[in-house]
């Protein structure tokens, strides 16, 4: 299987979320401007502001978080689109080597469940990021108004929160996208009884090894080695997840991919170090 360029995975979801971030910024500005316009005359009497401010912030939260309405369906739509595009990319990557590859994701409940689970988990993660944003905005605006800060200063102090939210979106889109790509690869390989793969890192400076991960993990060491999907190598050596074994793309923020090897299982033998080797490569 040729090299896989996974740099673009999740980029469309991040694009959609970035737009959401820009529109949330507008909502925040709108709601706060309205509040300031209506209540600027009573700025000396904090107690009279309490209710209208509370109303403004709850309205702002509702518009961003959406309760059950349009925001949810936009989110669902963006994540579904991205899921579909990752599925298509994975199929094309396989087709470059096996043109006749079956689409194992059609009408197969187990494989469909992988996609549905991914969509559900992504929406949940994005909502967590949004909830945190709304909480922090509420705190900052409340404090700013209590201190008597200017409207423009309050809006400016919200910028880092919006930026952090955007970074959270980027991480979710990439990390979850890579995880999905890995799960799809594994599912396709399993259906076709291709059990072995070559571990392939992204070959750049961000590939983790013991020195840049403080001894937690090392993927650089795995590059080019052969493993079996149901016998993945240990990737975590310290901390709460120590001892965890992962296939490429499953570890947190892992950008590695599995390059499927199409030889039959009998063509591989386990080496003492835990990886496998192709018997025809002996000699
Ligand atoms: Zn990795």
Image: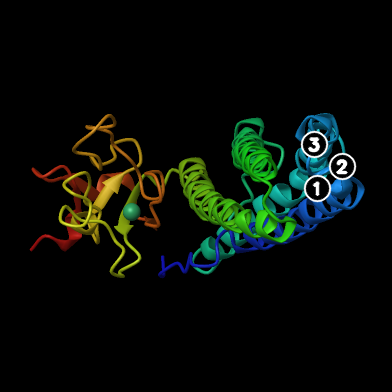
Q: Nearer the viewer, residue 101 or 68?
A: 68
Distance of mark 2 from mark 1, alpha carbons? Answer: 6 Å
Left or right: where 126 falls relative to 203: right
| Residue at mark 3 | 45
Q: Nearer the viewer, residue 217 or 230?
A: 217
Where is residue 65, by image quadrant?
top right
**Mark 1 sits near ligand 1, with its Cβ under 8 Å away:** no
Q: Residue at x 54, y 52 (%)?
A: 177
Where is residue 233, by image quadrant?
top left
Query: Is the Cβ of the residue at disc 3 closer than 8 Å to that at disc 2?
Result: no
Q: How many other residues sit within 10 Å of disc 1, few (<14), some (14-19) or many (≥20)?
A: some
Q: Quadrant of the C terminus?
A: bottom left
| Residue at mark 1 | 74
**Coloration mode:** rainbow
| Residue at mark 2 | 70
User: Which secondary structure, mark 3?
Assistant: loop
Q: Quadrant of the N terminus?
A: bottom left
Query: Picture coordinates of residue 58 (x, y %)?
Result: 79, 34
Left or right: where 259 falls relative to 142: left
For the question of whether residue 4 can be seen, the reply is yes
Distance of mark 3 from mark 1, alpha carbons? Answer: 40 Å
């Amino acid at each position: 299987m040729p090299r896989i360029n996974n740099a673009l995975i999740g980029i469309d979801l991040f694009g959609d979320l970035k737009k959401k971030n820009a529109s949330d910024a507008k909502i925040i500005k709108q709601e706060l401007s309205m509040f300031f316009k209506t209540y600027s005359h009573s700025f000396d009497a904090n107690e009279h502001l309490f209710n209208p401010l509370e109303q403004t912030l709850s309205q702002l939260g509702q518009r961003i978080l959406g309760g059950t309405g349009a925001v949810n369906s936009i989110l669902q739509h963006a994540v579904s689109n991205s899921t579909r595009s990752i599925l298509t990319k994975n199929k094309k990557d396989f087709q470059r080597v096996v043109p006749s590859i079956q689409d194992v994701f059609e009408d197969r409940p187990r494989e469909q469940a992988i996609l549905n689970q991914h969509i559900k988990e992504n929406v949940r993660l994005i909502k967590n990021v949004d909830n945190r944003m709304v909480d922090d905005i509420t705190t900052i605006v409340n404090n700013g108004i209590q201190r008597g800060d200017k409207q423009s200063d309050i809006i400016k102090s919200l910028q880092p929160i919006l930026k952090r939210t955007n970074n959270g979106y980027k991480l979710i889109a990439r990390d979850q996208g890579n995880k999905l790509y890995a799960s799809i690869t594994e599912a396709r390989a399993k259906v076709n009884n291709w059990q072995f793969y070559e571990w392939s890192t992204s070959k750049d400076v961000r590939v983790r090894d013991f020195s840049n991960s403080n001894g937690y993990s090392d993927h650089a060491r795995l590059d080019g080695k052969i493993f079996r999907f149901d016998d993945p190598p240990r990737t975590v050596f310290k901390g709460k997840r120590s001892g965890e074994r992962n296939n490429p793309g499953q570890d947190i923020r892992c950008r590695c991919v599995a390059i499927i090897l199409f030889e039959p299982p009998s063509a591989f033998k386990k080496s003492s170090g835990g990886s496998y080797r192709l018997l025809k490569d002996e000699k």
